[in-house]
Image (cartoon, rainbow, N blue to C red):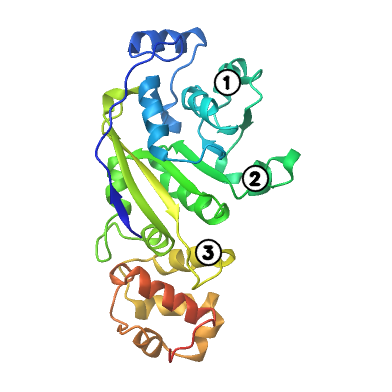
Amino acid sequence: MKLILKNNLSGGYMSDHRYSNDRKDFANYLSGYRLRPNHNLGQNFIYDKGLLQAMVAEMRLPPTCEIWEIGAGTGNLTAVLAEQFPRVTAIEIDPALARPLQDRFTSNPKVRLIFGDALKLTAADLANSEEENSIIDNIAVVGNLPYYISTKLIEHFLLHFHTALQYSFLVQQEFVDRILTPAGSKNYGPLNILLDNFTTIRKGMTLAATDFMPQPSVSSTLIHIIPQPNSQIDKSTWPDYRNFLHLAFAQRRKTMHNTYARLQREYPLLNNTNDLEWLAGVGLKPQIRPEAITPENWLTLYKTAIGIESMAE
C-alpha cells in the first residue's frame, strides 16, 4: 500500500433549500420530515454544497464513471454526484429516510435508490440490469461511513466489488490513523494487511466536526483507496485470504505457534509441515505474534497455505 498525502481543501458555499451553510436552515429541513439523525446508525450529515462539491472534485473520477454511494442520508452528496456522473446508485439502510430521498430523486433518471443493508448487497444486486453488467468495471464506490462499521464496509466492498476503479470514503480521523498503522502496532490487523497488499491510499481533505449535523466529537478525513494490480493471487481468492487473516488474528496476542493449529484445521496443506518450517520460509520464528508480521510475509504465508507457493520458494 502506498500513501499519498494531499493538503486540506475548503469549499465555497452555494445556497439551496437543502444545502445551506446555516445549520438552522438544514435543521428546519430535517424537522419538516420529522427526522432526527439516528445515533445508532452513526448518522452525521453534511449540509454545505460547496464542501460536497470539493469532496467530489478531489475524487478525480472519470466523467463516465458509475457511482455506488453507501449511505445516501438526506441525499445531499447524491445530488452533487448526479450532477456530474451518468448514474448514481444510492444505498440507504434507514427507512426513515425513504420518503425524503424518494421525494427528491423519483423524477431523476440518473439516480437509483436501494433501501437495505449495504453489507448484504452483491455485485449482481447493484449492476445496471438494463446494460447486463456492462458497466460493472467502470464504477466507483463512495460514502460517508459511520465509524462503528467502517472496517466491515471497506472489507466487504474491497473483496466483493474488487473491479471498482476506486473507493472514496469519508471516515473519522481516528480510523484513518488505525488503518495506516504499520506492523507491530496494537491497531495493526487484517484490514491494514489487505489494503497494503492490494491498494494505494490517497489521503485527502479533512472536515472539521462543525461541518456535520449533528456534530461528532472528532474530525473526519476523505480517503481514496485505489486497487492496484497484484498477480500473486487471483482476486477471486481475496475473500478467503481475508478469512485466513481473521483466523490468524482471532487471538492476536497468541504466538504463531499457538495460532498454527487453528490454521491447520481450515487449511489442510499445513498438516504437511510444521509451524517452524512454515514460518522459516519467510525468515520468522514460531514465537512471533500475528501483529508483528508484515503484509508481504502474510501474503507469502497464505500462498503456501493454499498450495500456490512451496515452502522452499
Q: CA distance from mark 3 to mark 2?
A: 22 Å
Left or right: residue 256 versus residue 65 is left
Local secondary structure at mark 2? loop
**Residue 273, horizontal then vertical, whole percent:** 46, 90
Q: Is 159 placed above or below 50 here?
A: below
Q: Which mark is residue 238?
A: 3
Q: Is 30 placed above or below 306 here?
A: above
In what quadrant of the picture does the N terminus appear?
bottom left
Instruction: Please count the marks in the image.
Output: 3
Q: Which mark is residue 135?
A: 2
Left or right: residue 65 versus residue 24 is right
Q: Of callouts 3 and 2, which one flags the residue occurring earlier in the amino acid sequence?
A: 2
Badge 2 amino acid: Ile
Q: Of callouts 1 and 3, which one flags the residue occurring earlier in the amino acid sequence?
A: 1
Residue shown at 44%/11% (left/top)? 16
Of 229 and 264, the residue lying toward us: 229
Q: Is 224 placed above or below 191 here?
A: above
Residue shown at 50%/71% (left/top)? 231
Left or right: residue 83 versus residue 281 is right
Badge 1 amino acid: Leu
Badge 3 amino acid: Trp
Tell us which disc is closer to us: 1 or 2: 2
Residue shown at 37%/21% (left/top)? 50
Q: Of callouts 1 and 2, which one flags the residue occurring earlier in the amino acid sequence?
A: 1
The residue beneath circle 1 is 101
Local secondary structure at mark 3? helix
Local secondary structure at mark 1? helix
